[in-house]
Image (spheres, grey):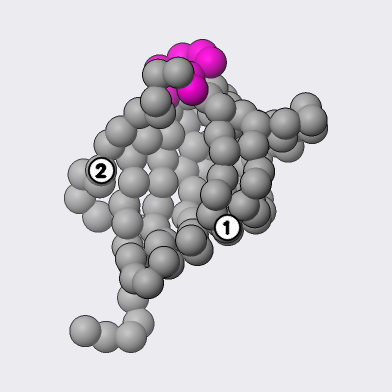
Amino acid sequence: MSSFYAPVTPQGAGESERPAPEKVLSGDPVFTTWNLEEREGLYCGIWRSTPGKWRVSYDEWEYCRILSGHSVLTDAEGTEITLRAGDSFILRPGFSGTWEVIETTTKDYVIRL
């Protein structure tokens, strides 16, 4: 196996799921995830969601970069951050709030447990 992985693009159908019903506030969001690397508490890949809004709570550290779409991330205090292609951000353990996908959103991510 090479130590270099390229290109970093979704391959195949990916894994699809929905948020737990009790977390959904609006819509019927469907997530598709393409895990590209999983090892020793580190995960990275591509994630896509269709429109909807749901509650989130993070126990892990996550770096994300929005590749396409439009979303709004709102923290527990009500501060909204609009996310569009090219935006990058970090979510730290303890973050809670809501994630709303306005237009189908695709991001790449690195998660550290």
Image quarter (top left, top right, bottom left or bottom right) of the N terminus? bottom left
In the picture provided, is 70 more to the left or to the right than 3? right
Is 47 part of what is drawn in magenta? no
In which quarter of the view is residue 81 placed? top right
Mark 1 — residue?
61
Q: Quadrant of residue 74?
A: top right
Task: Identify the residue position indicated by label 2 in the image.
Answer: 15
Residue 31 shown left or right of residue 27 in the figure: left
Per the model, the C-alpha gap separating discs 1 and 2 is 21 Å
Q: Nearer the viewer, residue 41 or 81?
A: 41
Q: Residue at x 34, y 46 (%)?
A: 33
Secondary element under disc 1, as helix, strand or loop, is strand
Please state the extent of the stretch shown in magenta in the rendering: 23-30
**Three-letter amino acid code of the residue under disc 2:** Glu
Answer with the quarter of the image where residue 28 lies.
Answer: top left
Looking at numbered disc 1 in the image, what kind of residue is underneath it? Answer: Trp
Q: Earlier in the sequence, mark 1 or mark 2?
A: 2
Task: Identify the residue at horizontal 62%, vertical 52% (top origin).
Answer: 93
